[in-house]
């Protein structure tokens, strides 16, 4: 098929789109693919680096308050629809897929007006404003969490597909990468990771618990985020930095590759992280970011913790003591780890990309 994919703004919108494209290529199901994004968005760098054809439109999101700037936003939206129609006429797609972010609104809406099959993919439990708008026009709405059903009034359009990123990681095997970080490859390991930019509250709690981690019967891989690394290292006593039990890093490239070597993950509860963790069945402690729209990370985390696959610590309750206590309880019990792992795998969607591809092919062949 010929397919246009669009999603931007955050990795949570981009990486599922990239995972879908990758799987379509693996199955030899693409004649041609075009990614539509913005020049300034994160997608510009990620998609171009992957060697995928990329075209841009200019579009911005509405301000929540009534301002004159919103007049400019409306003008941009209308002009982006005109440009999207031109892109569609030139590329002639069989289907158009939007994975969220303002940029996907124009290209998906334009495709709808041109009677081309359209699908949106919602990664979170709480739907984004773009997908809520597009839901009225598209042919199918693919969701990654069962809880997202309540976010859309168009129930007949809904299909539970999971997050394509899950299928991208599910077959990764244990590969003893911990040696690269001066840790033992045969010792139980917890990874504390606040996301690519890091999370200051998580970092501070981890720093203050270093004395307990140094004496534990498991090891800690502490990934600070690049912008926080120097500051974190300055705050940690050098004897803990020299501990065989602890490794402190700014970031890990190809993070999914190391996941099978990890017994417990501590961090934020973004949709992509949850997709990867549940596909592999890794126990988790989630500390949701309270700063995201509609507190959707808390809702994401609850969908996993409510079935016993993860623990949840609200950031307001995060202390060095609560962090260590929750980690220690899980890491000190193989049976707890096994139970959490089993429950995690039960809600994981290891064939998510193939499920979404079926939605696409059913529409194209309709």
Image: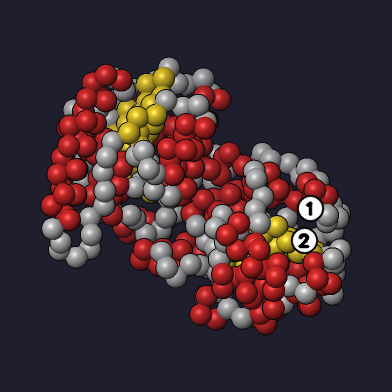
Q: Choose the circle earlier in sequence order: 2 or 1.
A: 1
Residue position marked by numbered label 2 in the rendering: 247
Position of 284 compared to 156: left or right?
Answer: right
Q: Between residues 355 and 293, which one lies in front from this camera angle?
A: 293
Q: Quadrant of residue 148?
A: bottom left
> What's the residue at 15%, 40% (across, down)?
78
Mark 2 → mark 1, Cα distance in angstroms: 6 Å
Look at mark 1 in the image and give the residue it sits on: 181
Q: State whether residue 14 is above or below residue 290.
A: above
Is 64 placed above or below 101 here?
A: below
In the rendering, at what x and y percent does residue 294 appear?
35, 66
Mark carried by residue 208: none
Say if 145 sits above or below 2 in the image: below
Residue at 73 percent across and 55 percent down: it is 262
Percent of width and height locating residue 95: 32, 28
Query: Viewer-proximal residue, 1 or 324?
Result: 324
Looking at the image, which is closer to me, 348 or 137?
Answer: 137
Residue 290 screen position, x and y as percent: 44, 70
Task: Mark 2 and mark 1 in contact? Answer it, CB < 8 Å.
Answer: yes
- The answer to whether any part of residue 42 appears in the image is yes
């Amino acid at each position: 098929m010929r397919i246009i994919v669009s999603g931007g703004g955050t990795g949570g919108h981009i990486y599922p789109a990239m995972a879908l494209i990758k799987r379509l290529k693996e199955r030899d199901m693409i004649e041609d693919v075009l990614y539509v994004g913005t020049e300034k968005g994160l997608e510009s760098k990620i998609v171009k680096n992957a060697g995928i054809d990329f075209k841009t439109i200019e579009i911005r999101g509405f301000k929540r308050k009534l301002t004159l700037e919103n007049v400019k936003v409306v003008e941009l939206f209308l002009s982006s629809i005109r440009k999207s129609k031109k892109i569609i006429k030139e590329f002639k797609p069989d289907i158009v897929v939007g994975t969220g972010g303002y940029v996907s609104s124009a290209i998906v809406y334009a495709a709808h007006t041109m009677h081309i099959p359209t699908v949106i993919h919602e990664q979170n439990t709480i739907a984004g404003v773009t997908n809520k708008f597009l839901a009225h026009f598209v042919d199918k709405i693919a969701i990654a969490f069962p809880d997202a059903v309540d976010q859309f009034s168009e129930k007949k359009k809904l299909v539970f597909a999971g997050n394509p990123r899950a299928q991208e990681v599910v077959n990764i095997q244990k590969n003893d990468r911990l040696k690269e970080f001066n840790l033992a490859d045969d010792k139980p390991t917890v990874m504390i990771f606040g996301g690519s930019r890091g999370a200051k509250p998580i970092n501070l709690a981890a720093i203050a618990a270093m004395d307990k981690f140094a004496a534990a019967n498991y090891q800690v891989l502490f990934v600070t985020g690049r912008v926080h690394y120097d500051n974190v290292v300055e705050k940690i006593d050098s004897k803990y930095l020299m501990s065989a039990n602890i490794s402190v890093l700014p970031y890990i490239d190809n993070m999914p590759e190391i996941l099978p070597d990890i017994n417990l993950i501590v961090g934020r509860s973004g949709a992509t992280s949850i997709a990867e963790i549940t596909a592999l069945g890794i126990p988790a402690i989630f500390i949701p970011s309270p700063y995201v729209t509609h507190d959707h990370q808390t809702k994401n985390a609850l969908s996993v913790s409510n079935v016993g696959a993860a623990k949840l610590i609200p950031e307001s309750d995060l202390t060095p003591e609560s962090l260590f206590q929750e980690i220690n309880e899980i890491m000190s019990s193989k049976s707890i780890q096994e139970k959490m792992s089993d429950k995690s795998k039960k809600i994981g969607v290891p064939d998510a990309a193939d499920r979404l591809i079926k939605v696409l092919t059913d529409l194209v062949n309709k």
